[in-house]
Structures are given as structure tokens and as C-alpha cells.
Image (cartoon, helix red, strand yellow):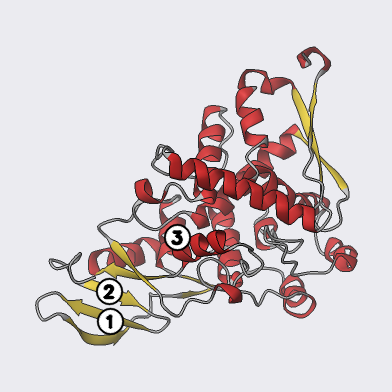
């Protein structure tokens, strides 16, 4: 850390304090309280990375403004990735996640100032919050912070940057399952959940874990990209719900909206720094590919900005295949059918 940032003042953010690292004396020289470091949210907290994404309406490579350092206390088994099997996959995901973040002073001030100007989303319905707290289990840690921090970011970003679509979809996007077969809510409670939501919200929440797996499996987006010129003839898509394998269907208009929900969600998985170095991360590859697809088709409806990074190299291809195999393995374990069917207008069939 000292070698990389000798000419800078580095700020280590914790939940309540900020430590200033002095390059001249080689030590952390002061500790001061900072009210803007964390902003209280209905469920979780937004760290500086998430505040920055919400303020700018997108993500960027913060190399030069932040650095990361290995976190020796990181416990993979306390996260949603505890069910990941295999020494190599577990080693790779731990390498990506086990990091502490250090920001420089200028970045802290800039992000805090920009975020202070963001209109805050309306409070979420108390009945939904109570349901999440009493009928579900969101106690697992996420890739960065708590599960509730992640849900809060997705909800707030949608409320500010994807109007007029309901942010409650992204607040509850994981309630029917995540990619590693962790289920915060039991399937028998689906009727209770449905009573609190509009049919449109429930449709997207039911679809979310399934479409995410199809994106991570890398087949769906490849097929859609290959048939880019015929997408005006696509009427919809059929697939299976993750939690109970029930067949679901989205019209094409619903599907475009849903892919934008997925786009917002994927922003929270981008590496903080060194994108060219970290572009091999499978979920970041999907983020970049979905952004490119929605941009090329003119269907990027959420406000999202990011600087494209070329995905190349043997490492990226290896991790792509490994990530795809992992998705298939997780679905097979719970009897979830990853097959899908694109519904084309008759004249579009070959």
C-alpha cells in the first residue's frame, strides 16, 4: 500500500471513522468522525462506491482514486457464495472479494458532494419491510457488505435512474433465490408476497433469478446478439422459475424492461479499480455484454454510464466457461430447468 501510494494521502473508511494515511511519515496520523461516509437507508447502507454510482448514474474505474488491500479476515462461508464448490472456484471468488478499500481525500469529498445532491427515494412500504424482516432471511453477507446493503443500492438506483418503473422489484429481486441456491424466502410464502405487490412487480420478481441465471450461463445473450437484426419479430420468452421450476413467460416489452432491471443489478458487481486487469471476472463480463447489447439495440432505458472494456485473453475465456458450468450445476442441484424458448413471429422462423 505504501509503495503504490507514496505521493498521496489515502483514506481508510470504516463504518464510523476515517483514517488518514500520511505518505511522509508512513503511518495513519489521525482519526476523525465523518457523517457523510455512510448514508442511512431503509434497510441497508450505501458505501462510497454505491453512493458514487447513484450520483453519477453509472460506474467507472476508480484507479488512482482508490486502492484495495487483501482482507485477511474475509470469510467466504458467511456470504451467499458459501455453497460454491471446488477449490479453484472458491479460491478465485475469494481473491476477488477479500479486499479492504482505501479512498483518497479528493475522491471522498467529490463523492460526498455529488451524492448530497441526489434526490432520495421514497420510503418503502412498511408492510414489505416487515415481511422481509420477519418472514425471510436476508442475514447472509453479499459480495460487498451485507445483503441488505446490496438490496438498498439496487432499490435506490432504480428509484432515481429507472423511472417510472417500480424500485420494489429490485428491492425484492433476490427473495425467490440467488445464483448460489440461497433462498431468503420459502416457496410456500409466495401467495403472501403476491398480495403486497402489483401483478407487474410480482412478474418481474418471479422472473429475476431465472433471467439472471440465463445471462450468467451465457447462452441467451449470445443468441439474442446473433439474431440482432430479427429482434423486432421476437414476441417474448418462456423459461422456468428458479424456486419451484414453474414455467413463466414475459412479453417482449416486459423482457426489455426486465433486462434493464438486470442491468441496474449488475452494476453492483463491477470491480472498483483496474477494470482491464479484472475484466476476466465472469459477472463483470456479463455486465459489459448486457450494456453493449442494450445500447446496440436502443433498449437501454435506465440511466447507465460506463466505459466499455474489451474482454479478451485466455483467462477471461477460462473464467467464462467456469462461470457457465457453475450456473448449470447449481440449477441441476435443485431440479431447475435452464431451458428457455424464444417466441418468434411466424415470418421470423427459419
2 and 1 marks in contact (CB < 8 Å): yes
List the residue tagged with mark 3. Answer: 118
Disc 2, SS = strand
Asked if residue 245 lies left or right of residue 81, the reply is right
Q: Position of residue 75 (x, y in %)?
A: 53, 77
Q: Residues within 10 Å of mark 1 (few under 14, many from 20)?
A: some
Q: In this view, does 9 lie above or below 201?
A: below
For the point 56% across and 64% down, the residue is 87
SS category of the residue bearing label 1: strand
Residue nearest the viewer, comparing 70 with 229 = 70
- Label 2 vs label 1: CA separation? 6 Å
Instruction: Mark 2 vs mark 3: give the one in front.
Output: 2
Q: Which residue matches tag 1?
A: 19
How many numbered marks, from 0 up? 3
Q: Point out the tag, 1 or 3, that comes first from the N-terminus.
A: 1
Q: Quadrant of the N terminus?
A: bottom left
Which class describes the residues within 10 Å of circle 3: few (<14), some (14-19), or many (20+)?
Answer: few
Does residue 338 appear left or right of residue 247 in this picture? left
Place of residue 258 in the rendered image (x, y in percent of width and height, measured from the top left):
68, 44
* Discs 1/3, front: 1
The numbered mark, 2 or 3, whose residue comes first in the sequence reads 2
Q: Distance between the residues labelled 1 and 3?
A: 26 Å
Label whose residue precedes the other's in the sequence (2 or 1): 2
Q: How far apart are marks 2 and 3 (CA)?
A: 23 Å
* Corner quadrant of residue 121: bottom right
Q: Residue 335 carries which label?
A: none
Where is residue 303 shown, x and y percent of the image? 51, 44
Q: Tag 3's secondary structure? A: loop
Q: Name the residue under label 2.
A: 11
Where does the image place residue 160, in percent across and percent down from the top left?
A: 54, 55
State the residue at coordinates (63%, 46%). 324
Of the 4 image quadrants, the one containing the C terminus is top right
Amino acid at each position: 500500500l505504501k509503495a503504490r501510494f507514496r505521493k498521496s494521502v489515502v483514506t481508510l473508511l470504516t463504518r464510523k471513522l476515517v483514517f488518514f494515511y500520511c505518505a511522509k511519515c508512513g503511518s495513519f496520523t489521525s482519526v476523525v468522525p465523518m457523517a457523510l461516509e455512510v448514508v442511512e437507508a431503509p434497510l441497508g447502507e450505501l458505501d462510497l462506491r454505491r453512493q458514487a454510482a447513484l450520483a453519477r448514474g453509472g460506474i467507472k474505474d476508480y484507479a488512482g482514486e482508490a486502492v484495495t488491500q487483501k482482507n485477511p479476515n474475509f470469510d467466504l462461508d458467511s456470504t451467499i457464495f458459501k455453497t460454491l464448490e471446488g477449490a479453484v472456484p472458491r479460491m478465485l471468488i475469494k481473491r476477488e472479494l477479500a479486499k479492504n478499500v482505501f479512498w483518497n481525500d479528493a475522491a471522498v469529498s467529490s463523492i460526498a458532494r455529488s451524492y448530497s445532491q441526489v434526490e432520495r427515494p421514497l420510503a418503502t412500504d412498511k408492510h414489505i419491510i416487515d415481511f422481509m424482516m420477519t418472514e425471510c432471511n436476508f442475514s447472509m453477507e453479499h459480495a460487498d457488505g451485507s445483503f441488505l446493503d446490496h438490496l438498498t443500492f439496487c432499490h435506490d438506483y432504480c428509484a432515481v435512474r429507472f423511472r417510472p418503473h417500480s424500485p420494489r422489484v429490485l428491492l425484492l429481486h433476490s427473495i425467490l433465490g440467488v445464483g448460489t441456491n440461497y433462498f431468503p424466502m420459502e416457496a410456500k410464502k409466495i401467495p403472501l408476497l403476491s398480495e403486497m405487490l402489483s401483478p407487474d412487480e410480482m412478474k418481474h420478481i418471479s422472473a429475476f433469478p431465472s433471467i439472471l441465471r440465463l445471462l450468467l450461463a451465457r447462452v441467451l445473450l449470445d443468441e439474442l446478439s446473433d439474431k440482432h437484426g430479427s429482434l423486432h419479430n421476437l414476441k417474448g420468452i418462456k423459461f422456468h422459475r428458479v424456486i419451484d421450476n414453474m414455467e413463466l413467460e414475459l412479453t417482449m416489452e416486459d423482457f426489455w424492461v426486465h433486462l434493464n432491471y438486470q442491468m441496474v443489478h449488475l452494476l453492483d458487481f463491477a470491480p472498483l479499480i483496474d477494470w482491464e486487469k479484472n475484466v476476466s471476472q465472469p459477472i463483470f463480463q456479463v455486465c459489459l455484454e448486457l450494456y453493449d447489447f442494450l445500447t446496440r439495440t436502443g433498449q437501454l432505458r435506465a440511466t447507465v454510464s460506463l466505459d466499455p472494456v474489451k474482454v479478451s485473453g485466455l483467462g477471461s475465456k477460462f473464467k467464462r466457461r467456469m462461470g457457465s458450468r457453475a450456473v448449470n450445476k447449481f440449477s441441476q442441484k435443485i431440479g431447475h430447468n435452464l431451458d428457455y424458448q424464444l417466441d418468434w413471429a411466424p415470418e421470423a422462423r427459419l
